[in-house]
Amino acid sequence: MSVFTAVIERCSETGLYVGSVPGFPGAHSQGETLEELRENLREVIAMLLEDGPPTLETEYIGTQTVEVA
């Protein structure tokens, strides 16, 4: 079993949830609900993994709060 971290945002124009795995080319999808997005991401990642383990271009570190005066 492989575990990947996805970044999830909500599109203000469509209302859809959009998710991607940082550094994993092609590992992105969307869905009307978080559950639909999760399932769509699972399917995309599984399909990409059929070609072998990914060569990640970057490593997800996290988020940071930045204050601006």
Image (cartoon, rainbow, N blue to C red):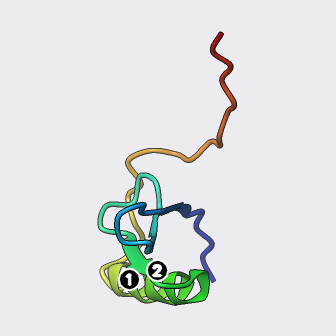
Q: Quadrant of residue 26?
A: bottom left
Question: Residue at coordinates 44% horizontally, 72% vertically from top-left?
Answer: 15
Q: Position of residue 65 (x, y in %)?
A: 69, 30
Which quarter of the figure is the C terminus placed in? top right
Which quarter of the figure is the N terminus placed in? bottom right
The local secondary structure at tag 2 comes to helix
Q: Amino acid at mark 2?
A: Leu
In three-dimensional space, the C-alpha distance between marks 2 and 1, rounded to whole angstroms, equals 5 Å
Vertical position of residue 7 compared to residue 51: above or below: above
Q: In the image shown, does 33 or 55 lie closer to the viewer? A: 33
Vertical position of residue 68 compared to residue 52: above or below: above
Disc 1 crowd rating (10 Å Cα; few below 14, some 14-19, many 20+) is some
Disc 2 crowd rating (10 Å Cα; few below 14, some 14-19, many 20+) is many
Say the numbered circle drawn on residue 44. 1
Instruction: Report the side of 38 relative to 69 (left or right).
Output: left
Question: Residue at coordinates 62% horizontally, 42% vertically from top-left?
Answer: 61
Question: Residue at coordinates 34% horizontally, 79% vertically from top-left?
Answer: 48
Q: Amino acid at mark 1?
A: Val
Q: Position of residue 67 (x, y in %)?
A: 68, 19
Q: Quadrant of residue 47?
A: bottom left
Q: In the image shown, does 64 or 15 lie closer to the viewer? A: 15
Question: Residue at coordinates 43% horizontally, 74% vertically from top-left?
Answer: 16
Say the numbered circle drawn on residue 41. 2
Say the numbered circle drawn on residue 66. none
Residue furthest out toward the front: 13
Q: Position of residue 39 (x, y in %)?
A: 52, 90
